[in-house]
Amino acid sequence: MTASDDRSDIRRLIEPTAEALGFELVRVTFTGGGSPVLQIMAERADGTMSVDDCATLSREVSTLLDVEDPIPGEYNLEVSSPGIDRPLTRPKDFERWAGFDAKVELDTPRDDGQRRFKGRLRGLEAAEVLLDVGAETLRLPLAHVAKAKLILTDDLIAAVTAGQPDGPTPPNGPSRGE
């Protein structure tokens, strides 16, 4: 395993259970090494995820993983909310968080050699992430986005805390695996 493998096999296994409990999976990763960790980030459809929600999902997923045993050896299971400076992993994330600053990394460089970008997220259009960088709006193919996440700014904190009426809903749970 590499240091942050996407575990689509685990996602397929646990997604029905998560959905039955009212959760959407945001990201499922496995980090190997001395103390391997299976990290599951989830939230409710309204963007919330309480500590109790994390505990409920953790119990149910743990039971399922014990029965199915898809990962050989010992590992730690970590269930958390995406947090404020959340990863952007689904097309709807790019739409929902439009207007906020983000970092986007492509899996392959563009023609100009650039792979990493930082700017104001403008949403999605025709399977491309729109990102304002300076005076230019870049169009980055969603299919080539390797990583993307929100940047923690005062605007983002204020919006999440206030729960903008037509924008982001504040997360209620732990961030960064707390």
Image: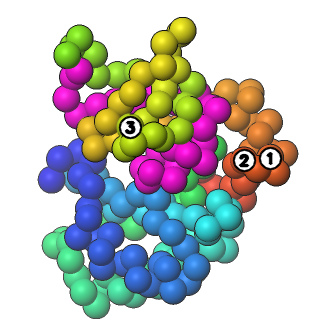
- Residue receiving disc 2: 167
Are the two marked residues, 1 and 3, in contact with CB atoms closer than 8 angstroms?
no
Name the residue tied to disc 3. 128
Give the quadrant of the C terminus: bottom right
* SS category of the residue bearing label 1: loop
Q: Residue furthest front?
A: 126
Question: Is residue 27 visible in this depiction of the protein?
Answer: yes
Relative to 30, 172 lies left or right: right
Residue 118 visible in this rendered orientation of the protein: no
Q: Where does residue 45 sit, x and y in percent of width and height?
A: 61, 67
Could you tell me how far apart the alpha carbons at marks 1 and 3 are, in whole angstroms? 25 Å
Disc on the earlier residue, 1 or 3 = 3
Neighbour tally class for label 3: few under 14, some 14-19, many 20 plus, Cα within 10 Å: some
| Closer-to-camera residue (131/105) | 131
Q: In the image, what residue type sits under mark 3?
A: Glu
Which of the colour schemes (rainbow, by chain, secondary structure, one colour) is used? rainbow
Magenta stretch contains residue 75 = no
On the image, which quarter does residue 27 sit in?
bottom left
The disc labelled 1 sits on which kind of residue? Gln
User: What's the distance in space between the residues labelled 2 and 1, CA to CA?
Assistant: 5 Å
Quarter-wise, where is residue 40 in the image? bottom left
Q: Secondary structure at mark 2?
A: loop
Residue at the disc numbered 1: 164
Contact check, label 3 and label 2, Cβ < 8 Å: no
Question: Quick check: marks 2 and 1 in contact, CB under 8 Å?
Answer: yes
In the displayed structure, does residue 139 sit left or right of residue 74? right
Q: Quadrant of residue 13?
A: bottom left
What range is drawn magenta here? Answer: 88-110
Name the element at disc 3: strand
Residue at 47% across / 31% down in the picture?
A: 130
Q: Magenta span has 90?
A: yes
